[in-house]
Every structure is written in structure tokens, then in C-alpha cells.
Amino acid sequence: MDHEGFCQGQYGLIACDNPGLFPDNMTLHFQTGQLNQYEVIPNDKTMEIPIGGFLPGSYYGGLSSDAPYVFVSDAGMEKLAPEAYISSLGIDITASNEKMVLSDIRELCNQSGKISIISKAELTEGLHSAKITLYTLGGGIAFVLAFIGVLNFAQFSVTRFGCCLSL
């Protein structure tokens, strides 16, 4: 891989686990456009980017989609779409550094006020809390249904067998 060529935006890289599926000297051609309220409005401009190499499919966290991920440098992105903006950013850190890094990133983002942060650890914690709530709710419903069943059985026994209680 020509690292300098990649940094200068001369070509892009594709993340895939089977590079043999792609031809040698491949160039991607695509039409540009604008995204407006979840609708793509194409324009007449077409772009192309040569593919200069491949990255392992797990390089970007093993995300799956129908189309492969294409990686370009900042210079390459400036050539392809000068008005593009960063919509998401992934940071790979170790679990031991997660809280410290999240705190530092929150501090940086609070200066701007326009950036929202979603942490994988916070999402996991939220899902754990939701799971406990659902288990509690499910257990409560099961208890009520079991109690109704016992009452039904007791009423059936009293009416069927004429059970009488004396004090």
C-alpha cells in the first residue's frame, strides 16, 4: 500500500474479508447529490476514486452492510465532496480507559454545544436497566396470573365439592 498516495487522496481502501471478489485496478464511479429530509436528490456530477488496497472486514468494528465500506483520507474526501461534514466518529479504546476517555471527550464537546455523544458503555448500562425493568414487570404479571389461577381453582373446588368451613 502506498501510504503517501492514500494520504494525498489519490485512492481509497475497501474493508472486506475477501479481496478476491474485487477486480484489480478497480475504480469506483458514483453520482453525487444532496440529502434532503431522508431523500437523496442527485445532481449531474459523477465522481470516481481508484481503489488502492483492502483492509480487513473487522477493521471498522466488524460493522456489516450490503455494501463494503470505502475509506478515504481527508484530502481524498475534500476532492470528492468539499462540503461534506463528519456525521459520526468511532473511537476504539480499552475498557480500562473508557471512563477517562469519555470524560475527556464530553469536556471537549461541551465547549461546542452542537455535538451529541453516545457511549457504548452507557448504551449497555441502559439496556441492562431496561432488562431488569422488563424482568420485574414480567414477574409481576406472572404472579398476578398465578394468583388468579389459584383463586379460580379454589372457587371451582368449593362449588364442585361443596367444601364448607366451620369456625
Image: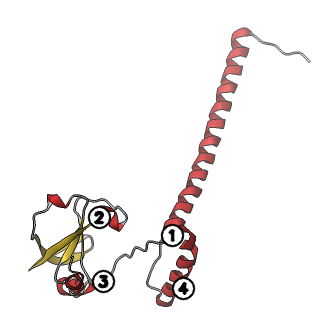
The residue positioned 65% from the left and 31% from the top of the image is 146
CA gap between label 1 and label 3 equals 27 Å
Q: Earlier in the sequence, mark 1 or mark 3?
A: 3
* Residue with the most extreme right position: 167
Q: CA distance from mark 2 to mark 3?
A: 25 Å
Q: Which residue is mark 1?
A: 94
Numbered disc total: 4
User: Based on the displayed image, in which of its 4 quarters is residue 81 positioned?
Assistant: bottom left
Check disc 4 and report the residue beneath it.
107
Residue 98 is left or right of residue 20, and the answer is: right
Q: Secondary structure at mark 1?
A: loop
Determine crowd level at label 2: few under 14, some 14-19, many 20+ residues with C-alpha closer than 10 A. Answer: few
Residue position for label 2: 56
Say which element carries label 2: loop
- Residue at (67% x, 17% y) in the render: 156
Residue type pointed to by label 1: Thr
In this rendered view, identify the residue nearer to me: 106 or 61: 61
Left or right, 89 with reference to 27: right
Where residue 166 sits: x, y (%)?
A: 89, 15
Residue, x 71% and y 20% (percent of image)?
Answer: 154
Distance from Cα at disc 4 to Cα at disc 3: 21 Å
Tell me the kind of residue under disc 3: Tyr
26 sits to left or right of 68? left
Which tag is nearer the camera, tag 2 or tag 3?
2
